[in-house]
Amino acid sequence: MNYYLRRTARIPLTVLAVATLSFGLIRLLPGGPFTQLRLQLIRQGVPVEQVNARIEALQNIRPDAPLWQQYLDYLIGVVQLDFGQSISLNQPVAEVVARALPWTVFLVVTSTLLMFAGGVIIGAVQAYWEGSTFDKLASSGSILVMAVPYFIFAVIFLFFLAFQLQLFPTGNAAARDIEAGISLDYFASVIHHAILPIAAFTIGGIGSTALSMRGNGIQVLGQEYVEVARLRGLGDGRIATRYVAQNAILPMYTGLLLLIGFRLGGTVVLEQIFSYPGLGYYLIAAVNANDYPLMMGCFLVITVTLVVAVTIADLTYSFIDPRISTGDADGY
Amino acid sequence: MATETDSSSEEGVDWRSDASAEEMTRRERYGEFYRRMVREPAIIAWSDLRTRVGIIILSVYLLMAALDVFGLWRNPSPNQAPRLLPPFQNWAFPLGTTQSGVDLFALIVDSTPFILLMVLAGGVWATTLAVMVGTVSGYKGGSVDTAITSVSDFFMAIPGLPLVIVLAITFSPENPILLGVILTINYWAGLGRSIRSQVLSIREESYVEASRTMGSSTFRIIVKDVLPNIMPYVMVNFVFAARYTIFASVGLYFIGVLPYTGQNWGVTLNNAYNQGGLFTMQALHWLLVPIVAIVGLALGLILVSQGMDRIFNPRVRTRLSGESESIEGEDDTTAPPGGMV
Amino acid sequence: MSTDTNTDSTRPTATDETTEPDTVVDDPVLEIRDANVTYSDGDTYVLEDVTVDIDRHEVLGIVGESGSGKSMFASALMDAVPDPGLLTGGIRYHPPDGETVDVLELSDEELRKFRWEQISMVFQGAMSSFNPTMEIGTHFTETLKSHDKHVSEGMEFARELLENLYLEPERVLNSYPHELSGGMQQRALIALSMVLDPEVLVMDEPTAALDLLMQRSILGLLEELRDEYDLTIIFITHDLPLVASLADRMAIIYAFQFAEIGERDAIIGDSAHPYTRALLNATPNLDAPLEEMQPIEGEGPAPVNVPSGCRYHPRCPLATEECRTVDPPFAPIDEASDHRTACHHWEEAREEIPLNFGEDAPDAASVDSPRPAAGSTVEDRAVAAGDQALLSLDDIEVHFEEQQGLLDRFRGDPDVVQAVDGIDLDIHEQDLVCLLGESGCGKTTLGKTMIGLQRPTGGTIEYRGHDIWEAKDGNADIPYDEVRQALQIIHQDPGSSLNPNRRIVDILSEPLHHTHPNIGRAERRSRMHSLLERVGMTPAGDFLDRYPHQLSGGEKQRVALARALLMNPDAILADEAISAVDVSLRIEIMDLMLELQSEFHTSFLFISHDLSNARYFAEHGDGRIAVMYLGEIVEIGSAERLIHDPRHPYTEVLRWATPNLDLDAMEADDPPIRDIDVPDPVDPPSGCRFHTRCPVAREACTRDDPELLDVDGGDGKAACFREDPDHEYWESEPLEGAVEHPEEFAER
């Protein structure tokens, strides 16, 4: 079968598998999924005999139906983008998730791009001046940075820059008093709020990126085609970009596929520390409030985001590297 | 194998005779084992500055674990000391105390065995599974490969931490080993895929084909021919998996989604953070001590991993143990095949 | 060949011959004076006191073994010595018009322009000379742009060059390097080096990675390019007979210095340096009597410990005390010639070291005298063994699904490569068969199928009458282990044939683990010990505890041979097993394999692309050579018959491609084929698969595939319609470009 079709067809399959997994896990939870909701409804004064009906209305699932029926109802809901009603926020989960998703994607994409660019530049400079003082310092720095988890950077930034020096806000994605919209003030506020989380997340990954770029760069610089290009009289700029950079960066692309998963998962801790209203923040909020519908919704959406991201990266890889012909990016 | 040619060759050829038999005593054999497996790797590891520093750092953690296991330091408890004592002021409480007057050093020491066990469990689980999955699917190929690859693709598609959070709520793991396994529950998938792609190229090496030709079993080929070649990579990734375990556990303790009894580094960090550590300079050490403990352990592991390449490299091994030099010009990979004429 | 200005020139009386030695060259394009390349602050010389002139429009062949400094010489000509090497001396370049350029005095920008516009270079590995992630065409355009040339005019010229090199310009320019075969890449690289129309082309081992036929074809093309574009070519190689066919003059480099230089004919026929003579004698060629081929003992020195006096004296049979102490000057042999050599005793050398080919050869007749008919001995043995073949291949077919390119993935069906197609072959006890053919002809696939490593997609293969693959699936009355033990392999690349992480003792324990699982440690060790000594590795005890990286290439192949023998095999597949070994050692290892064959009663399947190696094997071991083309055996027979009476036109082509040192027949003529490249095995030609390249193909050849038929008046079989005097072939029209008789092709 056609490779691209096959690869794309895997998305719904994976999503289905993850949906099933989260459905199953939730059922293993202490007290079952709806204990909390049932208690809450009763506390709100809903008559006991109507509780199940209310739950059904809110969550698309009949609590007294057989498991397979619940499962089917759940899947049908997911397909219709209906993840039920959040118990703690009293809003449809889909709405909450739709609001949160862009912030998470914004954080991950920006910081990953910055991390990649920064690591590549540092590593390239190191490779070019292999053995120089800068190379040695940068290598030691990279190793040191690799030993520090990103959330430690987050805490340190928060402590010094936000709390002590009060240069940056300590939470939220934008100032509350500025209306969301296409205005300069709003963008400035968004960036002001995002700088610390993005910085923490970027620095945390820059060390390993720089180290692998350094290794690849040194290897490519020793290749004969670089020497031949020099003899052919090509300019340094062209050799640096089309020859060295391109061939050194390509092998790192597959590593990026794996990295996306770790970074997307990492937002959970990051957003919690900065009270940044992304998917991770709501996931933790749901966990703390025993808000299972919201929890499942966040989990599912984070997973789908990852699946889509990995598929995109996988599919574009063969366009970027002409040598890949099997289509199976075996590098990772 | 009782073929005609077989029997005839047995008589005519002298290589079957025991002319130059040299017996080795049991003692010599143990000596040789010690030399190959312990002494040589140790010499190589120690010869590299980074690895040496890493080993020293890790030894400190082992010492701390020993302090706790043998009960050589007090257990942490509230009001055992003055509140918020700064570090290096009172040598009874070398790292200072918390707001509730708990000895910070006692806090760190107390949870060291727990953390080390968890890190080991996470690293061992993730790498062992990844090696098994990667070597088998890479070496066997075919439908075995397709099946394993599909499963690991699925696990790769789930972001780690959110899954761990859901699992942690479900299973409430408090045992360090179980916790280590849950934290790296899908870490093996990505690692397994990259090991697989390495095995795919090793499988094509002539010496693997030679072993296949001799009729060696798949298991034997994987153990003898494939594994030694990916060992440096596996060891480096063992360290990365261990590092991930520390980071993930501390991160999740820190945001308070992992169940715990008593304190550990992540919980201490959480307490310091939430009970005013962020707002005053007086409490800074409360925040910094667990951070240093975490970073130190990760740093020690990474430094040790930097020398893995050398430990498993036979060239380094022969050079450092003073055996005969490599053949001249062997490194000259650009030399044309065919040599002269 | 081109006119040789040097021969006719009269040599002016030179007052100081050592500093102005090359006055015989009257129009030098490059003058190199006392060129030195040093490392480690001048302590280590990798090129020492080289003084030579290069004549305009000549082809200078430079021969040296790996690590002799010959590549350094190439780099020095472009002032491109790799860091931190230091180049001193003088290199002057005389353009056809304009002022003389002192290359070492050029500024960076001038040097950038000078390279590729005046002198350009072709490297050995075309694959590693191209940026793998850039199309070939971009390499051309960026070169033109960075030299401020008109791009579309330049690309016109590039297309012309590519066409002259028998390539399809558009296809090649739009391809990525990995999409072309090795031969195509190398030719594209030659075009790239000429795109700025340089005066001088320096070629450093430009064909070493290719098989013989492609090497010789490229040499033929170079000759044409040289004439058409007035090039001066400096051709650097380790392969003496190869460059002999192209060169006007030849130089021999030994241990970072020139050992001898002179007219090609003088170097081949009347060489003065003992090293040159030894090299010539170590060259396997089809005309020399086998007994005369002699390996050179020892190895060339490393730069850090160059011997005092004459550098060659430790290996020289004529070395005297003078040689050990006094460095011989690189001086002309006599007043009237430009033949120079660095030897105290060149006159003795000419007498004491006879050449084993040409007029000096003692008695070339021994080759022609019929040996005991090779084929019949095999038959005899087959009868003795109860008429059952050791291995029997019946209509074997191996088809692969090809990995698909990017665009193919949008289409449906994968391409199927027909690597091996319909082969019948019997291997007897103690048989010896050489599979001969170009790369991509399926010889390795067939070899691996023969020893049960590759499952055929069609046909059957039987070991002593039992189907191997049935046995593997457990459906035969013979345990698969027995089959596995009986059929072993020795690989081409000594670097990867031994696990780098295991000591020799562990590597050799592996076969014993299978054949003698219950013997003790001491016995195991002693068995390995005595076998290692038998394969020439003494003292064996030393070698047992080493890692493979502590062995030389030849020693690794000996270990691989020992490993195979420890299995007590009935047949060993040697897949190009000597082509990566130094030539001086090849004969020794081939002899060892032949000796062990009779000692161990095994059969050998020997794979090669080199007819002279195959011949050595087949003739010494009384075996057969099977010539393969595109997955089929086109001719099979004794080496004797194949070389002196080839019946298939393709065998003749391979014979043409085999180096020889016969001065009358060595001109680099056009290959006797109509197309240089092998057709795509995904879609092989109809009828006879060779008809697209065959010099004598006719219309009938495009329709039917000829069968292997017994050869009239000789042993073996051939698959060509020309073998059948009544075939309709003789009535049909020759194809475009084809001729009546093979002999006419070269004169066309």
Image: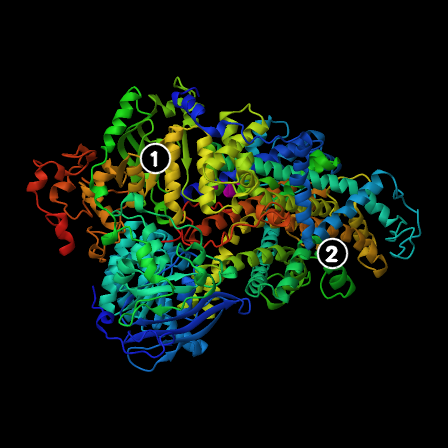
Q: In the figure, is residue A21 to the left or right of C476?
A: right
**B199 magenta-colored:** yes
* Label 1: chain letter: C
Considering depth in this image, is C600 or B231 the residue closer to the camera?
C600
Secondary structure under the numbered disc 2 in the rendered image: helix
* Label 2: chain letter: A
Q: Which disc, if any, is residue A152?
A: none
Q: In the figure, is residue A184 to the left or right of C511?
A: right
Q: Which quadrant holds residue A59?
A: top right
Q: Which residues are magenta?
A: B196-200
Considering depth in this image, is A47 or C676 the residue closer to the camera?
C676
Q: CA distance from mark 2 to mark 1?
A: 69 Å
Secondary structure under the numbered disc 1 in the rendered image: strand
Q: Which quadrant holds residue C644?
A: top left
Q: In the figure, is residue B7 to the left or right of B70?
A: left
x and y, in percent, of residue A261 in the image = 58, 47
Q: Main secondary structure of the magenta part?
A: helix
Q: Can I make out residue B156 in this image?
A: no
x and y, in percent, of residue B139 in the image = 49, 36
Three-letter residue code for mark 1: Leu
Which residue is located at x 13 percent, y 37 percent? C723
Category of crowding for the residue at label 1, using alpha-carbon neighbours closer than 10 angstroms: few (below 14), some (14–19), many (at least 20):
many
Three-letter residue code for mark 2: Val
Q: Is residue B120 above or below residue C145?
A: above
Residue at the far front in the pictured view:
C321
> Which residue bears the numbered disc 2?
A155
> Which residue bears the numbered disc 1?
C605
Q: In the figure, is residue C255 to the left or right of B87?
A: left
